[in-house]
Image (cartoon, rainbow, N blue to C red):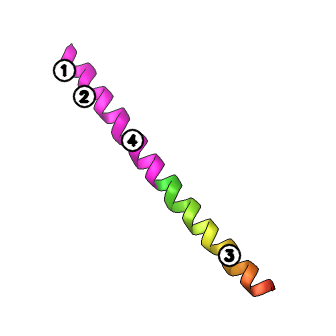
Amino acid sequence: MFTVKKAALHQVITSTKIKIRGAIFVGRFLLLRMQAFENYLF
């Protein structure tokens, strides 16, 4: 029982890390796009 809970917790932590990494990647990409757009406008 304990090992199953530990494995499930590990899976949740791993998926959360992947989501955070993905969010950071998307955020950086959007920030770069916005900067490029501002440079294009001005």
Q: Secondary structure at mark 2?
A: helix
Sooner in the amino-acid sequence: mark 2 or mark 4: 2
User: Which label was assigned to residue 15?
Assistant: 4
**Residue 3 belongs to the span the image colors magenta:** yes
Please give the residue where the numbered disc 1 appears in the rendered image: 3
Sooner in the amino-acid sequence: mark 3 or mark 1: 1
Q: Is residue 30 above or below residue 12?
A: below
Query: Residue at horizontal 64%, vertical 74%?
Result: 33
Distance from disc 2 to disc 4, alpha carbons, whole Å, reads 12 Å
User: Which label was assigned to residue 35?
Assistant: 3
Identify which residue, 7 or 23, lies in the foreground. 23
Outermost top residue: 1
User: Which label was assigned to residue 20?
Assistant: none
Question: Which x, y percent locates residue 25?
Answer: 50, 61
- In front of the other: label 3 or label 2? 3
Question: Which x, y percent locates residue 37?
Answer: 73, 79
Kindly identify the amino acid type of the residue bearing the numbered disc 3: Gln
Question: Marks 1 and 2: CB-CB under 8 Å?
Answer: yes
Where is residue 8, by image quadrant?
A: top left
Find the magenta span and give its range.
1-21
